[in-house]
Amino acid sequence: MVAPQSEATRPAPTGQFVYVVDDDLSTARLIEINLSARGYRVRQFDRGSPVLEALKDEQPDLIILDVMTPGVNGLEVARRVRRTSLVPILVVSVREESATKLAALDLGADDYLTKPFSIDELLARVRALLRRAQQGQPPQLAHYKCGPLTINLSATQVALGRQTIKLTPREWDVLRVLVKHSGQVVSARQVLQQAWGPDYGNESDYVRAYVNRLRRKLEPDPENPRYILSERGMGYRLAEGEK
């Protein structure tokens, strides 16, 4: 069950389109009612497969996705969606274990919310994800080089020697924070608030998941990182670049 609503109704400024994917019809209906009351357009699904079919013909602004959908489960839906789309994905689940959260984030989900949750909390997460998707990241004239690793933030390009590396938007968000503070220790909270937004601060497993993803793409040996370093009990540090 979803905890009762307490936030005052506020309309969505642009009528964004949201998919709600949950086989718990009472929960899905409550989410739909509250989103619709705030001006969002909502399409509801009780299974994963129809979502993948619908995405061939339309593009929602956000997907709220339960992990335990019948047939194709939520994690597999997230994985398949990420093959072709960068739509923000908010995963919801009764499963609290870190392994499930990290699996969802690693497959491309942008946020994870454990049931039961309040409507206020859900709406805050929805607003944060949609705001970031709309605003994007401002251009930054920053360039980083350390050995064969070259990062050009203004051109959103990263390369290892002559090999161009493709990153997802959220991976870029995290990498920008590390480059901005290269050579300095950055706490998980700092990364969260600069990469996800001011509504975040305690979801350190998000940062860990994305740091691991970046290491797999950028490090010659992800288990013994050369560029993205961990400082035990403090946070992360991008090795100081060349002057």
Image (cartoon, rainbow, N blue to C red):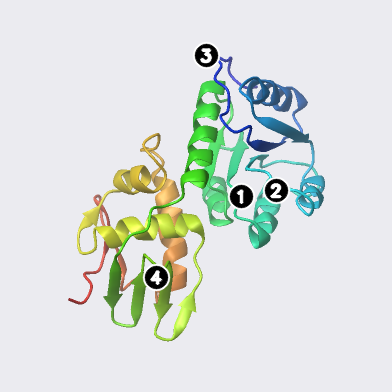
Residues 21 and 156: in front is: 156
Label pair 2/1, CB-CB below 8 angstroms: yes
Mark 3 belongs to which amino acid?
Answer: Ala
- State the separation of the CA atoms marked 4 and 1: 30 Å
Residue located beneath label 4 in the image = 223
Residue located beneath label 1 in the image = 87
Q: Which mark is residue 59?
A: 2
- Residue at 37 percent across and 37 percent down: it is 202
- State the separation of the CA atoms marked 3 and 1: 27 Å
Q: Earlier in the sequence, mark 3 or mark 1?
A: 3
Is label 4 or label 2 in front?
Answer: 2
Left or right: residue 226 versus residue 205 is left
Mark 2 belongs to which amino acid?
Answer: Gln
Mark 4 belongs to which amino acid?
Answer: Glu
Crowding at label 1, few (<14), some or many (≥20) Cα neighbours within 10 Å?
A: some
* Position of residue 85 measured from the top left corner of the image (x, y, whole percent): 64, 56
Label pair 4/3, CB-CB below 8 angstroms: no
Q: Which mark is residue 8?
A: 3
* Position of residue 237 measured from the top left corner of the image (x, y, whole percent): 26, 61
Left or right: residue 234 versus residue 70 is left
Crowding at label 4, few (<14), some or many (≥20) Cα neighbours within 10 Å?
A: few
- Residue at 39 percent across and 70 percent down: it is 223
Q: Earlier in the sequence, mark 2 or mark 1?
A: 2
Secondary structure under tag 3 reads: loop
* Position of residue 183 measured from the top left corner of the image (x, y, whole percent): 20, 64
In the rendered view, would you say 202 is above or below 52? above
Is label 4 or label 1 in front?
Answer: 1
